[in-house]
Amino acid sequence: MNYSTTTIWVVIIGLGVGTFLLRFSFLGTIGNRPLPEWVLRYLRYTPVAVLPGLVAPLVIWPAATGGVFDLARFLAALATVGFGIITRNNLAGIVGGLAVLYLALFGLG
């Protein structure tokens, strides 16, 4: 399809305004008031719930292989989780997973 420049900008601005209003509806209405303790407790689990949803498709169907499962990337993901759990250090998990990825890519061909 061939969209005009005006149409593209209208869509971009509309999405920006929509995103702002969606976030403001929650953050703007609360203002400086403290959140209840039960809300804060549940908000702590948000990154833990969102990150697997973002990472899992990249591990199971990586774009680098055209969506075909790749054992090297799967092993690197397992190593990242393992290093992170053992060391309790995010950077160690990332570096360990990176090392396993390159070793597996080299070793598996």
Image (spheres, helix red, strand yellow):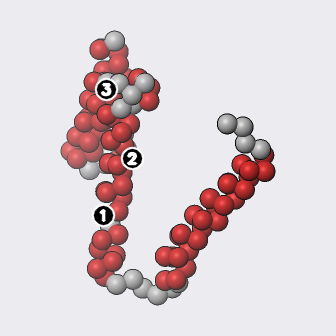
* Coordinates of residue 12 in the picture (x, y in percent): 67, 54
* Coordinates of residue 31 in the picture (x, y in percent): 52, 84
Q: Quadrant of the C terminus?
A: top left
Q: Along the horizontal axis of the image, is 19 left or right of 104? A: right
Measuring 26% from the left and 35% from the top, which residue is drawn there? Answer: 79
Which residue, as the protein is rendered here, is positioned at the far top?
Answer: 109
Query: Which dot marks residue 36?
Result: none
* Coordinates of residue 42 in the picture (x, y in percent): 30, 71
- State the CA–CA distance, disc 2 to disc 1: 15 Å
Tag 1 secondary structure = loop
Query: Which dot marks residue 69?
Result: 3
Q: Is residue 76 visible?
A: no
Q: In which quadrant of the rendered view does residue 10 lie? A: bottom right
Q: Which residue is mark 2?
A: 54
Measuring 36% from the left and 43% from the top, which residue is drawn there? Answer: 55
- Does 44 sit above or below residue 92? below
For marks 3 and 1, the one nearer the N-term is 1
For marks 3 and 2, the one nearer the N-term is 2
Do callouts 2 and 1 mark residues in contact (Cβ within 8 Å)?
no
Give the class, few, some or many, for how many residues have Cα within 10 Å of label 3's Cα (few <14, many ≥20).
some
Q: Is residue 57 visible?
A: yes
Q: Which residue is mark 1?
A: 45
Residue type indicated by callout 3? Phe
- Does 95 sit above or below residue 4? above
Q: In which quadrant of the rendered view does residue 86 lie? A: top left
Q: How many marks?
A: 3
Tag 2 secondary structure = helix
